[in-house]
Image (cartoon, rainbow, N blue to C red):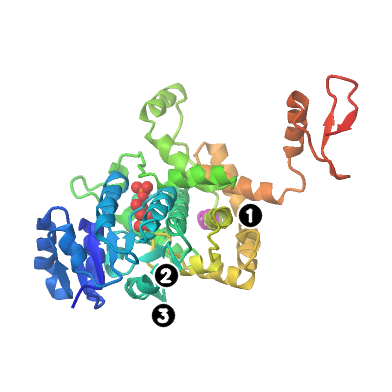
């Protein structure tokens, strides 16, 4: 019998996806540019299911039942385009090309339109969960046509992570919707990690404790509302001791965070859409700042005295303050991320189900967390929710956390410990709930220097004041 699905590109992610498919009973055709990889996959894991090993792209395509479904798992950018172009010449109308890499959604939109002209479906699919997830059950976010999902849905839903019997996979929406949602997932991932890193830094500055002791605090937190994969592995990383020196592992890692670009894409897209994802942006810039070694060295010399300690009166109160500040800031990051998805969905006509998105992030993906269930509930109860912050569960968590949040941010500022994501999230919250914003003054200044006009609070219309003249007001 022919293969039900194919995977080309057998580096670790492709290999693990192919194994996951085979283990779940699907017949998988496998292909790699250098055939040694294909052979080693079958030699090492052939007993896990039915692999159809192929050496040329033509054999690969011929091995598939129709409509063919081909997963492309090669490097993003040029290599992906090259494989898609080659496939396009071999496939037939109705066949489906699936890109499971981290592609930019605009590239996905372009590729989808190009393949559609050949009668082919192109399905940009976000896959989260790293190597382990690909093998044991990732969170899967497919875009593309409804029709393609009829073939892919049953396969992807079977190999995805399952939470309470519900698969962490659903059709997100047309063309680039899947990659867009995966991009925002990564933006939230950046914010989540930056917030965790700041919490660790504050705890260390406040308690003067060793990383292994701090690991215990994160393990404790992972038993409550903050329960999540990232908090769990924070405990692991902090508890880890470097074998060659016997020192805490985290103290031996160079403090410059890298990125492959999905966080940057998220921020760029949010700027285009006019959505203030300030926490995600702050987290992305915090990574950039950490990488500017020369500037950091110069500033350290010019302004010595960093590495200050926080003033802590009561250990338990302080730890609880940091926990609540972390939870509140994390809620802001998710509120901003969902705001961004909602704006993208409107702009590109994707009709994305926000509650459904939260549902498939409950398992498999890097940001999986207990409170995604609460996000799903919030959108179930109120599909047109203006911001997650005001949904009952989150409003309560934030309100309960505000005093702690303020103490932590104020104390960090006083002592000189940078907490950019904590403080930016708090400022976002305060700005959203402000009675009046100084934006009114900005409008006045714009009108003063450039006749950019303004609206009044007391009557409709667009106005301009004749600043250089008699300062009377005219209707614009
Ligand atoms: C996932 C991750 C993954 C991402 C890495 C690294 O959902 O499995 O988001 O797709 O590539 O997390 O990203 P950075 O190198 O940009 O940190």
Query: What residue would you read off at disc 3?
Result: 165
* Crowd class of label 3 (few under 14; some 14 to 19; many from 20; radius 10 Å): few
Q: Residue at x 14, y 58 (%)?
A: 56
Indicate whether 185 appears above or below 95.
above
Q: Nearer the viewer, residue 358 or 461?
A: 461
Please indicate, yes or no, whether residue 323 appears anywhere in the rendered image. yes
Locate the N terminus by quadrant: bottom left
Q: Earlier in the sequence, mark 3 or mark 1?
A: 3
Q: Which numbered circle lies on residue 431? A: none
- Residue 254 appears at what percent x and percent y? 31, 39
| Residue 319 in magenta stretch | yes
Q: Which mark sits nearer the N-terminus, 3 or 2?
A: 2
Query: Would you say 143 lies left or right of 43 here?
Result: right
Residue 298 x %, y %: 41, 23
Q: Decide if ligand 1 comes within 8 Å of the CB at mark 1.
A: no
Which residue has dot 2 on it? 147
Q: Which of the 4 image quadrants contains residue 149?
A: bottom left
* Secondary structure that dominates the magenta span: helix
Is 128 part of what is drawn in magenta? Answer: no
- Of badges 3 and 2, the one in the foreground is 2
Left or right? Give the position of 405 relative to 237: right
In the image, residue 252 above or below residue 367:
above
What residue does disc 1 label?
402
Residue furthest to the top in view is 468
Mark 3 touches mark 2? (CB < 8 Å): no
Q: Which residues are magenta?
A: 315-323
- Distance between mark 3 and mark 2 Cα atoms: 25 Å
The 10 Å Cα crowd at callout 2, few under 14, some 14 to 19, many 20 or more, is few
Residue at 20% x, 58% y: name it.
10
Residue 161, position in %: x, y?
36, 71
Residue in the foreground of this view, choosing between 300 and 66: 66
Marks 1 and 2, how far apart at CA: 47 Å
């Amino acid at each position: 019998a022919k293969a039900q699905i194919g995977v080309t590109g057998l580096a670790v992610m492709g290999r693990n996806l192919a194994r996951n498919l085979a283990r779940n009973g699907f017949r998988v055709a496998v292909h790699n540019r250098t055939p040694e990889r294909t052979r080693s996959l079958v030699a090492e894991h052939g007993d896990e299911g039915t692999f159809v090993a192929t050496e040329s792209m033509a054999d690969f395509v011929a091995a598939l039942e129709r409509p063919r479904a081909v997963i492309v798992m090669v490097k993003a950018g040029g290599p992906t385009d090259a494989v898609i172009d080659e496939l396009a010449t071999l496939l037939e109308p109705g066949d489906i090309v699936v890109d499971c890499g981290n592609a930019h959604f605009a590239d996905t939109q372009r590729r989808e339109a190009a393949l559609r002209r050949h009668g082919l479906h192109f399905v940009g699919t976000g896959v989260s969960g790293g190597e382990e997830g690909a093998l044991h059950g990732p969170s899967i976010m497919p875009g593309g046509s409804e029709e393609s999902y009829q073939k892919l849905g049953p396969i992807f839903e079977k190999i995805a992570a399952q939470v309470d019997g519900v698969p962490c996979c659903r059709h997100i929406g047309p063309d680039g919707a899947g990659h867009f949602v995966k991009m925002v997932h990564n933006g939230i991932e950046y914010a989540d990690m930056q917030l965790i890193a700041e919490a660790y830094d504050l705890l260390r500055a406040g308690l003067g404790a060793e990383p292994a002791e701090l690991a215990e605090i994160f393990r404790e937190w992972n038993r409550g509302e903050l329960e999540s994969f990232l908090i769990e592995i924070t405990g692991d990383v902090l508890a880890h001791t470097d074998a060659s020196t016997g020192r805490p592992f985290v103290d031996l890692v160079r403090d410059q965070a890298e990125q492959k670009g999905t966080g940057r894409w998220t921020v760029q897209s949010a700027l285009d859409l006019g959505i203030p994802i300030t926490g995600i942006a702050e987290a992305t810039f915090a990574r950039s700042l950490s990488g500017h070694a020369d500037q950091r060295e110069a500033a350290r010399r010019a302004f010595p005295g960093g590495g200050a300690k926080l003033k802590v009166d009561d250990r338990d109160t302080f730890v609880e303050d940091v926990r609540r500040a972390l939870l509140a800031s994390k809620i802001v990051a998710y509120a901003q991320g969902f705001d961004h998805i909602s704006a993208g969905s409107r702009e590109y006509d994707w009709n994305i189900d926000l509650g459904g998105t939260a549902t498939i992030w409950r398992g498999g993906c890097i940001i999986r967390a207990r409170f995604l269930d609460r996000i799903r509930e919030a959108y179930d109860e109120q599909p047109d929710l203006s911001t997650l912050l005001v949904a009952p569960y989150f409003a309560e968590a934030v309100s309960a956390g505000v005093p702690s949040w303020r103490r932590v941010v104020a104390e960090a500022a006083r002592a000189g410990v940078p907490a950019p994501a904590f403080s930016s999230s708090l400022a976002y919250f305060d700005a959203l709930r402000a009675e009046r914003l100084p934006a009114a003054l900005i409008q006045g200044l714009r009108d003063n220097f450039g006749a950019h006009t303004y609206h009044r609070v007391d009557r409709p219309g667009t106005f301009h004041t004749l600043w250089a003249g008699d300062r009377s007001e005219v209707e614009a």
